[in-house]
Image (cartoon, rainbow, N blue to C red):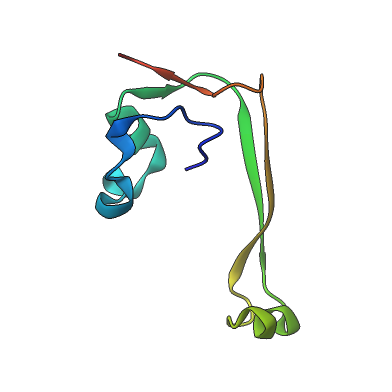
Amino acid sequence: MNAAACPFSDDFAALPLEGLVGGSLNRTLIEHGMVPHHGEQWAEVVGLEAADARLLKRRAGTSFLLRGGSRGTGRSGLSSTS
């Protein structure tokens, strides 16, 4: 979870140990009182070419985050329900 896009909350402290609710970031945020408000995020994922895979010690074709970004107002795209 990107801290720049999500305000800090003690509720999220156990997230690395407990994992996402039902494997879903959206469900986890809602469960912790956060709801989508505005903004847009995207990611471009590619399969690793053989040479890059060797450098990264991964298999060729493994999914790899090439780039990502967001648009919005520069503030969190989430609102607290509490």
Q: Position of residue 5 (x, y in %)?
A: 54, 31
Q: Is residue 16 above or below residue 53?
A: above
Task: Identify the residue at the far top of this view.
Answer: 82
Residue plotted at (50% across, 37% down): 3
Which quadrant would residue 62 be assigned to in this image? bottom right
Residue plotted at (28% across, 33% down): 11
Residue plotted at (31% across, 46% down): 15
Q: Is residue 26 above or below residue 22?
A: above
Near-viewer residue (8 or 31): 8
Q: Position of residue 27 (x, y in %)?
A: 33, 36
Near-viewer residue (18 or 59): 18
The count of marks equals 0
Q: Position of residue 18 (x, y in %)?
A: 25, 50
Near-viewer residue (6 or 52): 6
User: In which quadrant will I find the C terminus?
Assistant: top left
Q: Is residue 49 above or below residue 12?
A: below
Near-viewer residue (23 or 67): 67
Q: Position of residue 55 (x, y in %)?
A: 69, 82
Residue plotted at (33% across, 51% down): 16
Q: Is residue 28 above or below residue 71?
A: below
Q: Is residue 46 left or right of residue 25?
A: right
Which quadrant would residue 64 be assigned to in this image? bottom right
